[in-house]
Amino acid sequence: TTAETLIPGIGTTAADKYTSTSATVADSTLATASATNTVAAGNYSLSDITLAHAHQISKSGFVASAEAGTLSITVGSGSAVTVNIAANATLSEISAAINASGAEVSASIINDGTNDFLILTAKNSGDVNMITVTGTNTGVGTEFDFFDYAPPGANNSWVQQQDATDATVTINGIPVTSQTNSITTAISGLTLNLLKEDVGPTTLTVSKSNGAVANSLNA
């Protein structure tokens, strides 16, 4: 007798219910994995791993503007977010305003011992999530042109610290691409977390285990 017969509405057998599924990567420095019971047992070859990165840009040389202004910040195909900047705002105040604005970037400041660098980092990784910034004075000045940036690469004295990239991994000879390092759609029911770039290969093993309880219930 099966559990689905004994308990109405239960669509799985006791053997299914008490089956555990594990997913392990031979070289756990490259990736880790977890699986639901829907994943069939088997081995998968993983190779040519590259990681997803978030776009990051930096710039120094800021001079406070006597006028107020705005920064329009866009990441990828998302909506532009307007950040209002007060007259004579410091770089620290501008960084704080960006972080409070809801824009899909985080702002920080690094001092190299001489200069302050404004660092903008996209909140989401993937090659579609590149940062665009447009600065506008509220008056007749042009000081906010300092913040203008159009991807990719370096322009208007901005330096691209990190390119926006997708994660890639070849699974059993099939190239797989993801905007993040956590891949949930390549193998249904399995989550693969990429940790380090490497040509590999290494092996992902999905295995099943049935406990004695299941055998007893199905007797």
Image (cartoon, rainbow, N blue to C red):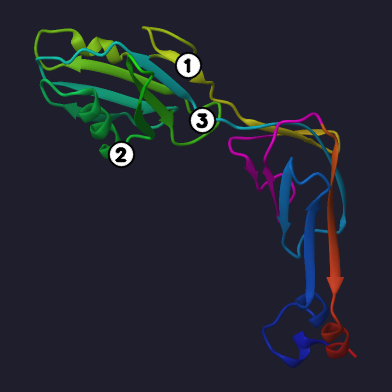
On the image, the x and y values in percent for residue 68 come to: 12, 20
Q: Which quadrant would the N terminus be assigned to in this image?
A: bottom right
Q: Is 76 situated above or below 44?
A: above
Q: CA distance from mark 1 to mark 3?
A: 11 Å
Q: Is 182 situated above or below 130?
A: below
Local packing at callout 2 (Cα closer than 10 Å; few below 14, some 14-19, many 20+) is few
Residue 170 appearing in the image? yes
Q: CA distance from mark 2 to mark 1?
A: 22 Å
Identify the residue position indicated by label 3 in the image. Answer: 54
Residue 214: image quadrant is bottom right
Q: Is residue 19 left or right of residue 133?
A: right
Contact? badges 1 and 3 (CB < 8 Å): no
Amino acid type of the residue tagged 1 in the rendering: Gln
Local packing at callout 3 (Cα closer than 10 Å; few below 14, some 14-19, many 20+) is many
Contact? badges 3 and 2 (CB < 8 Å): no
At a point 58% along the width and 35% down the height, the residue shown is 179
Q: Which residues are magenta?
A: 177-199
Q: Is residue 168 left or right of residue 26?
A: left
Query: Who comes first in sequence, dot 2 or dot 1?
Result: 2
At a point 48% along the width and 28% down the height, the residue shown is 129
Q: Which quadrant would the C terminus be assigned to in this image?
A: bottom right
Identify the residue position indicated by label 2 in the image. Answer: 102
Instruction: Please tell me whether mark 3 sits on a helix, a strand or a loop.
Output: loop
Residue 63: image quadrant is top left
On the image, the x and y values in percent for residue 187 come to: 75, 49
Q: CA distance from mark 3 to mark 2?
A: 17 Å
Q: Is residue 183 magenta?
A: yes
Q: Is residue 36 left or right of residue 61?
A: right
Residue 1 appearing in the image? no
Q: Is residue 153 left or right of residue 99?
A: right
